[in-house]
Structures are given as structure tokens and as C-alpha cells.
Amino acid sequence: MNERVRQYWNTHIHDLDISTSAPGSAEFFRDLDQYHFEKLHHLLDLIHFDEWKDKEVLDVGCGAGVEVVRFARAGAHVTGVDIAESAITLARQNLEQQGLGARLLVADGEHLPCPNEAFDLVFAHGVVQYTGDDSRMVAEIHRVLRPGGLAVFQGYNRVSWLNVLSKLMKTPLEHEDAPQLKRYSASEFRALLRPFDTVDLVFERFPVKSRLHKGWKGLAFNTLFVGTFNALPRAWVRRYGWHLLAFCRKERA
């Protein structure tokens, strides 16, 4: 399974089409960073990059290195791993463009080439839902996390506005053709993360205007749906966020 996953992500790097600039250029990485934190603006409130200065940070499924750059700029000692060699190539170029350094490895998150209890933070945003054996990846992340450390996971919420809208509008989600794509209920996601001592679950990723969807569907989404959804009291819709963000603590070896 994971060989198919590797082959897919080597040619389907996330958000690659968002920029009209040449991949690997300074303009390309600037566009990627802007779009990433425009779409995922909640991350800047939930992940305080500056808090990890001088700490050991592992980014699993690092892609083109958007968060690797943020952690490195904040002074963390960063290791980024991705199953796709093409992603690591881009992440390396991203760091070079920023004049930053990090350790980058082509590696499967189910078999991390890292010693036990090596990291203060493991950041695994948007990766467990795409791997062949999500439980094994969670166990590996638990293994490499130090006691007292924090692991951050993001998975997709099956009971979400975006999942329902996709089915109603017959519009496929990004990477719906991936070899593996899981969606979790909140209880299923908690069960997956049971190796950790505490799990705090946050529902996020509510509708924002999209640059990817075109035509009448894109117009309807951006002009009608986004405004209407976000006008509703957040207490009514909070549990239907597309992203399940889990903040997990490992208290003991």
C-alpha cells in the first residue's frame, strides 16, 4: 500500500497548483506560504511557532516545507520527513530560499528513522488519513516523542460541512483519488490516538473563499455559502469543522 502512496504523492504535492510562478522559485514559496495560512489561518492561533525555539521538532509529512520553514525561522531544531522524494526536494529548495537549515529525510511515517524519545514536538498535519496503517503511524509518533512532549495531529472530520457539501454538489475533495483517504468521526479519531495520555480535540477549518474552485460552483461557494455559513453562531456549527486537530500529550515513557 505505501509504495502506491509514495508514487501518488511524488506527483501530487499538496497545493502545488496554487502559484503561477515556477516551482522552487522564491515567488512560488511565497505564494504557497500565503495561501497555506490564508486557508488554515487558525494554525497561527493554535501553533505558536516561537514557543519551540531551541526545541527538537519533527514534521511528519512535511510536503514542500511550509511549516518546516516557520519552525526553523523561530529557532527550532527541525527534522522534516516525507514519503515523497519530490516533496523533500521542494522543502530543501524552500529552506535554501529562506537561508534556513533543517534536517530533511525521505521516509515513511510508519517507519520513522529516528531514535526513541527524540522530539519535544511532533507535528503531523494532514498525514494520518493518507497512510496505509494510521495506527502504526500514531504508534511511531508516540515512540519518538519525549515524555512531556506534544504531538499535533490533523485528520478529516467525516461529520463536517465540507464532506456533506462535496456529496451534495458532486464536487470531489482535494486528493480524493489518493490510494488511501480516511475520514473520522470525533470518537474514532480519539480512539486512534489512544496511545497518548491526554488528547484535546479542536474542530477547525470553516469555510473561507477558495481560489481552486472555478465556474458557477466556485461563484456560489464564495459568494453565498461562505458568507451564510460564517454568519451562523459558531456554537451551532463548531462540531462540523472539516479538520479535527488533536493536541496529544505523552506523560510517561
Image (cartoon, rainbow, N blue to C red):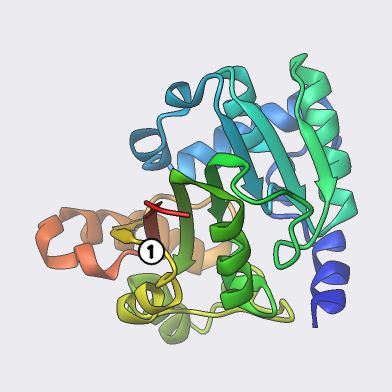
- Name the residue carrying label 1: 244
Foreground residue among 134 and 139: 139
Can the viewer see residue 32 in this picture? Answer: no
Q: Is residue 122 above or below residue 244?
A: above
Where residue 191 sits: x, y (%)?
38, 79
With 64 as the anchor, is 182 left or right in this view?
left
Pick the front one: 250 or 188:
250
Q: Give x and y (percent) for residue 15.
A: 67, 51
Residue 43, image x, y percentages: 42, 41
> Is residue 118 placed above or below 86 in the rendered structure?
above
Quick one: 181 or 33, which is closer to the camera? 181
The image quarter in which residue 202 lies:
bottom left
- Tell me if 236 is positioned left or right of 186 in this view: left
Q: Is residue 48 visible?
A: yes
Residue at 16% across / 54% down in the picture? 231
Does residue 83 appear left or right of residue 36 in this picture? Answer: right
Residue appearing at x 47%, y 39% in the figure: 38
Q: Residue at x 83, y 39 (%)?
A: 90
Under circle 1, the secondary element is strand
Dividing the image into 4 quarters, which one contains the N terminus? Answer: bottom right
From this view, report whether residue 30 is shown above or below residue 155.
above
Callout 1 crowding tier (Cα within 10 Å): few <14, some 14–19, many ≥20: many
Q: Please state which amino acid type lies under the numbered disc 1.
A: Leu
